[in-house]
Amino acid sequence: MIFHQVQNEESGCLSYLIGCGQAGEAVVVDPGRDRVDDYVRLARRKGLRITRIVETHTHADHISGNRDLAALTRAAIHVHADAGAVFEHEAVQDGDEIAVGSVRLTVLHTPGHTPDSLCLLVTDTARGGEPWFVLTGDTLFIGDVGRPDLGGARAAGDLYDSLQAALLPLPDSVEVYPAHGAGSLCGRAMSSKTASTIGFERRFNVALRARSRAEFVDLVMAGLPPKPPSFETIVAKNRGLVPLVASKPRPCTARETWEAVERGACVLDLREPGTYGEGHVPGALNVWIESPQFADRVSWFAPAGAPLILLAGGPSDLERALGGLARVGVDQVVGFVQRGMIEWRSEGLPVETVPQITVYDLAEWLEERRDVVVVDVREPFEWREGHIDGALSLPMLETVRRLGELPPDRPKAVVCAGGLRSSTVISALKRHGVTGCHNVTGGMTAWSKAGHPVTRP
């Protein structure tokens, strides 16, 4: 058996190529739209032909590459019968087997994360009759379980039943390979590891320690992160209900860009926060191309339906951005600012700034009891590990919805772990009329290294 895990570090997505060298065939599980060429090249290097594609569930965080991969390889696409897919596919159910040479993939229907969620129990019959590992999709992660976003508490109960019936009875030695790892929005406490075993998860996965169905439901539903605004659109595209399109951006002059902004377009500024803060297009959304979860953050904050125009530091950034945005279904990129802020300034067009302050500046302000509110946009678990005394906790994905909690007339020092999320939040708040924000460079990491005090609940 040939086994290869393909990791997308930017999004936390994990996909798999499994093949039989003797038969020269391979199956790809959970292909990403931005990795299609990688699967084809990988299979070719291994002397394999991709004949089957399997989805462990209908993804809501990224666009699947199943149809693009099938078009290149003529491979059959397998999804669960409850997926609601309208594109050409072969439906599978619990207990079905998918054979790739001497490799056998047994379908385990595990509803909960989604109604069509399934796991694949993989056996190399050339090695023996016992299962080697299980691909758990978004049912079981390393250190966590899937979010029951579609059905709430009822789906959480289904997830508990699936875990108890299909996965936890497996031998301790069976290896676990999920569809997502650290960096994904599909879980809350996922490990940075990308593999585990049933025995290890049974012992150390907090979500699996629940002693009853009711306790599990309460645990999984507590503090569930907000659902991404692109959730329904991505699901519809992955079911084939909404057509897939590709962005075809054209070069834009500064003047053309400004006219488009005045008509409702949004500039997506890919530059690092300090450069963005020195001067940017009014209303621009700042998500640095090097940010973790770059595309997910754009999909969260980009105005729905608005054309996007990219402003980058170089051509390679544009290419990376387009690939990442296509993965999450952000296909409304219509152009890019050809000569960036140089031409913008030479044309005398409006420019806005965001003040950047150091942690030493912030500490001095607080010691002098200046009228400033510290806004901490990190996640709740980060907040609990230590925060600035008196700060307002406003997690990044909740800031726009809760902007009414921000005092309108007071200066606001926005802090995250390192200064990236805070810049994105400030740019999003500015689009909603919130002023007086300062970006704390270095964030809480710099604050702690400088020896400034933190408080813990």
Image (cartoon, grey):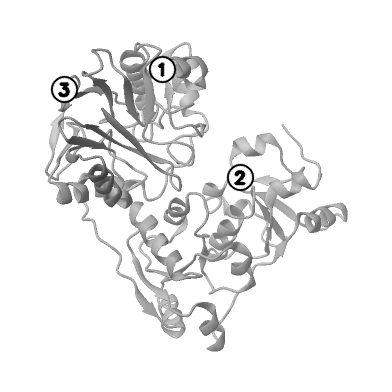
Q: Which mark is residue 164?
A: none
**Residue under numbered circle 3:** 96
Tell me which residue sits at (27%, 13%) in the image: 130
- The numbered mark, 2 or 3, whose residue comes first in the sequence reads 3
Q: Farthest bottom residue? A: 347
Tell me which residue sits at (49%, 59%) in the image: 289
Residue 292 falls left or right of residue 117? right
Residue 154 falls left or right of residue 99? right
Please report contact status of discs 1 and 2: CB closer than 8 Å, yes or no.
Answer: no
- The numbered mark, 3 or 1, whose residue comes first in the sequence reads 3
Q: Which mark is residue 198?
A: 1
Instruction: Please determine whether, in this image, residue 5 is positioned above or below residue 265.
Output: above
Q: What secondary structure is marked by label 1?
A: helix
Q: What secondary structure is marked by label 2?
A: loop
Q: Real-space Cα distance between discs 2 and 3?
A: 44 Å
Answer with the quarter of the image where residue 420 lies.
bottom right
Q: Nearer the viewer, residue 262 or 23?
A: 23
Query: Residue 305: x percent and y percent?
Result: 35, 63
Q: Can the viewer see residue 141? A: yes
**Residue under numbered circle 2:** 378
Q: Nearer the viewer, residue 138 or 221?
A: 138
Crowdedness of circle 3 by 10 Å Cα count: few (<14), some, many (20+)?
some
Quadrant for the C terminus in the image: top right
Q: Can the viewer see residue 240? A: no
Q: Nearer the viewer, residue 182 or 138?
A: 182
Please report contact status of discs 3 and 1: CB closer than 8 Å, yes or no.
Answer: no
